[in-house]
Image (spheres, coloured by chain):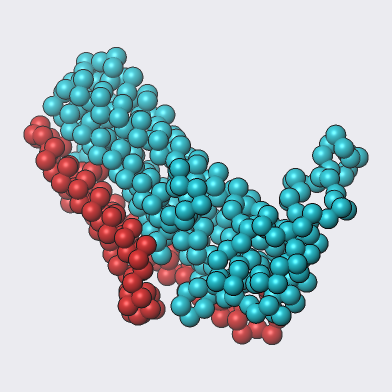
Amino acid sequence: METTVTTANNEEKTWGGGDIQPLGASYGKMMMWFFIVSDALTFSGFLGAYGFSRFKFIETWPLADEVFTHFPFMHGVPAPMYYVALMTFILIFSSVTMVLAVDAGHQLKKTKVAIYMFLTIIGGIIFVGSQAWEWKNFIKGEYGAVETKGGSLLQFVDKDGKRVALEEFAVKLPEQREALSRAKAKWFMQDAESLPTYTVAEVQAGFKAHPDLLIRTEKLTETKKKTVLSRAESETRLADAKYVVEGANLIRNEYGNKLFADFFFFITGFHGFHVISGIIINIIIFFNVLLGTYEKRRSYEMVEKVGLYWHFVDLVWVFVFTVFYLV
Amino acid sequence: MSHEHVSNTKRIWFVFGLLSLVTTVEVILGIIKPASLEFNHFIGLNLLNWIFYILTIFKAYYIVWAFMHMEGEKSALRWSVVSSVVFLVIYLLFILLVEGHYIYGVFKDSTIKWNF
């Protein structure tokens, strides 16, 4: 009987793939590579879809430099790129501590692995926090804009082309309407969201009262600037206004094309979700290191496997950084 | 090599320095946006974007090779991971971007105005 039974090996490690190692990689590592390849294709699909929409609206796409201009403790100072560069450095640095943890694992230095894992977790948490701050600024918006009946977005500038916020010129008219919340309306009359601070009429009246204001459309010029209309053209365009847009949500945003905010939320959100799951997995492995699980196994391969995932998250960020902020 | 128990600390810090340097260059270029690079095109893409994409792939190479330790794996594993991803991504981008550009043309030349 024994001669007909084919067993890969007699070791008790069979659950982990045994001693058969295709391509010289252990079972766990190989599966991590499988996952990374498929996840890389998922992210490529998202970034490709972003490229598709951008190519489709190539003449009206928002300029990233005008959208992401915030830096902590620098109110009102436009600082494009700096904050996202800082986030990139944080993530690269946490990748470095991760690879140092893997390196220490090869030498079976438990304390060193634990310290580097801990630093990696801290780096990840700082990154997710930074991203939350970025989202907060993006959602809150800065200047506000109006949307026309046809769905294009109008922003306001002064004579020098500097952006002007709605609150700087809009007037308060007496016929205000309150947002219909559940407490203040019939059950079928609820507003989808809270009303913007100003109504279209208030913006239009304020625009009329400030003759030096002009309207900027989404259209890009030859030199990759947004087109500023003349005063007469501005007045005709503003007559078509339908909504006042403040900040960003999934339906409309004050920066320009609606899809821009959707892709921003979805892609950076999906990446942030990967970072969060990476942090959780890192925490689990960190406690296993502290408990000496891998010390007993005489192998820190688990650290290597979560390391692969963590570096992958960093790798995706490198591409998100380029596609969203640079190009 | 994953089987050797020698410390790679020196190389790790070297790669960190390299990645930081490349990111700094990207950020500086992104802030200055030199007109000579931004408004000169090469195969439908301006030179600045060419630089950004090349530097991105350069960084990706170092992350995968040094941090994910691809350089220590068997070449069969390297090829199965890298070639399938590279091929499928190029294929996907080709389809999506060409199609996006086509729809841009349809919107632009059609008699109906979509956004007004």
Q: Is residue A185 left or right of residue A164?
A: right
Q: Nearer the viewer, residue A223 or A301?
A: A223
Residue A285 against residue A45 in the figure, above or below: above
Task: Indicate the quadrant where residue B36 lies.
Answer: bottom left
Task: Indicate the quadrant where residue A103 lies.
Answer: top left
Q: Is residue A212 left or right of residue A72?
A: right
| Residue B71 coordinates in the image, percent (x, y) | 17, 48
Q: Nearer the viewer, residue A245 or A4?
A: A245
Q: Quadrant of the N terminus of chain A?
A: top left
User: Which residue is painted at 76% across and 49% down in the image?
Assistant: A195
- Residue B7 appears in the figure: yes
Task: Indicate the quadrant where residue B49 lies.
Answer: bottom left
Q: Quadrant of the C terminus of chain A?
A: bottom left
| Residue A2 coordinates in the image, percent (x, y) | 23, 23
User: Which residue is painted at 40% across and 39% down in the image?
Assistant: A127
| Residue B9 coordinates in the image, percent (x, y) | 13, 37
Residue A201 against residue A159 in the figure, above or below: above
- In this rendering, the count of numbered labels is 0
Q: Please give the letter of the chain rendered in red.
A: B
Q: What shade does chain A have?
A: cyan
Q: Nearer the viewer, residue A313 or A187?
A: A187
| Residue B69 coordinates in the image, percent (x, y) | 20, 43
User: Which residue is painted at 43% across and 55% down in the image?
Assistant: A79
Q: Nearer the viewer, residue A178 or A46?
A: A178
- Residue A40 appears in the figure: no
